[in-house]
Image (tube, rainbow, N blue to C red):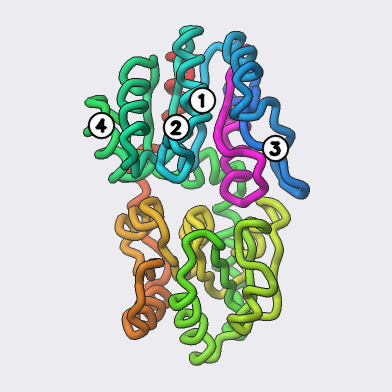
């Protein structure tokens, strides 16, 4: 049995990180690996299991990495200016320790960049070049940024939720078929999911106002009960009901029953795409923009201020219908890439 250290922002209690935690852990276990998890302190109510070592615990990580066969950085927006002053100080620790103990690192299904801070750029130019590591990155912009910064190649992959392994593990195809066989009633409420991070209150008001003006009933949806708008903020938008986050499977069931979803969360956007749920993306970061441009999805951004343009984008997104899932085959399946590279490691 191979021993693996799996690290990302697991344990913080939101749909995206719980989703990635379960997919990477289950894939590695299916490959016959014993998995130790590095992440954040688990929040009450999070679906993901206990974290074995905190991602900033240098001594704890050293003990784990010294005893494993290889390391996996599994999904999420890891290497960027928002992660920390170093563009992911916890990952810098992992890379340095992996180099010290001679362990191979598989960076799978993650974002890369933007890295604008000089120290972060110098750090990752050094670590990515010197460490025994390989990369499957999920955004076209990220691959370009990585290759320009490091001079190394990276594979362009889709997000792990689109992997064949994920489709089976999460029963995504069955959920999509269930929706197609029993579509939501037109009178069913659409779901609104906005983040507290990088808010554009003007865009929020225009989006919700447009939907209400068209006669849609609306309810709130939380993919992260600390990071998304709560009851008080939604009430300002004339939304009285909120569906709290209760884990990956219940969340998917909620999505598939909705006539449409408005979201500022990347993995909610991805889930809607694979389940065939019409979605209005409120784009706040490169990962969402990359996906929308790739899939041909109309979207609103957190920089948009023109009400006419916002209303037009909302209508276009709702009229767009399900995405062309054949396009997903244009990029590498990240969990299949992980399976192949795990044996090489």
Q: Gap between marks 3 and 1, in whole Å?
A: 19 Å
Q: Quadrant of the N terminus?
A: top right
Between 301 and 215, the one nearer to me in the picture: 301
* In this view, 332 is above or below 236: above
In the image shown, does 142 or 35 lie closer to the viewer? 142
- Residue 339 coordinates in the image, percent (x, y): 48, 25
Please report whichever mark, 4 or 1, sits nearer to the chain's N-terminal start: 1
The mark found on residue 161 in the picture is none
Q: Which residue is mark 1?
A: 72
Q: Sequence-wise, which precedes: disc 3 or disc 1?
A: 3
Residue at the disc numbered 3: 41
Q: Which residues are magenta?
A: 1-27
Whether the residues at callouts 4 and 1 have beta carbons within 8 Å, the answer is: no
The question of residue 10 being in magenta is answered with yes
Q: Residue under label 4, please give it.
A: 149
Picture residue at 46% right of the left edge, 8% below the top: 102
Q: Residue furthest right?
A: 44
Residue picked out by circle 2? 108
């Amino acid at each position: 049995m191979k021993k693996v250290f799996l690290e990302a922002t697991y344990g913080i209690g939101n749909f995206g990180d719980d989703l990635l935690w379960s997919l990477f852990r289950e894939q590695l276990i299916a490959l016959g690996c014993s998995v130790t998890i590095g992440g954040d302190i688990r929040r009450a109510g999070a679906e993901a299991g206990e974290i074995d070592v905190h991602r900033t615990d240098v001594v704890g990580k050293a003990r784990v990495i010294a005893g494993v066969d290889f390391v996996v950085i599994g999904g999420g927006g890891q290497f960027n200016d928002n992660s920390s002053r170093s563009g992911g100080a916890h990952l810098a620790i992992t890379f340095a320790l992996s180099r010290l103990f001679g362990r191979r690192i598989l960076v799978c299904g993650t974002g890369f960049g933007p890295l604008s801070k000089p120290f972060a750029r110098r750090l990752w130019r050094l670590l990515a070049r010197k460490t025994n590591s390989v990369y499957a990155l999920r955004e076209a912009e990220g691959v370009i940024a990585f290759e320009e910064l490091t001079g190394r190649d990276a594979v362009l992959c889709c997000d792990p939720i689109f992997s064949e392994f994920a489709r089976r593990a999460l029963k995504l195809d069955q959920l999509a078929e269930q929706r197609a066989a029993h579509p939501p009633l037109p009178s069913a409420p659409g779901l609104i999911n906005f983040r507290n991070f990088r808010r554009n209150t003007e865009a929020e008001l225009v989006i919700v106002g447009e939907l209400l003006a068209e006669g849609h009933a609306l309810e709130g949806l939380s993919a992260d009960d600390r990071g998304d708008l709560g009851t008080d903020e939604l009430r300002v938008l004339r939304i009285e009901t909120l569906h709290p986050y209760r884990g990956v499977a219940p969340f998917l069931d909620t999505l598939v029953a909705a006539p449409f979803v408005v979201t500022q969360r990347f993995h909610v956007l991805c889930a809607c795409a694979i389940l065939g749920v019409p979605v209005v993306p409120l784009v706040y970061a490169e990962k969402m923009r990359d996906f929308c441009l790739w899939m041909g999805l109309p979207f609103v951004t957190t920089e948009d201020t023109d009400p006419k343009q916002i209303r037009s984008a909302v209508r276009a997104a709702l009229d767009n219908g399900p995405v062309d899932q054949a396009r997903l085959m244009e990029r590498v399946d990240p969990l299949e890439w992980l399976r192949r590279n795990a044996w090489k490691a």
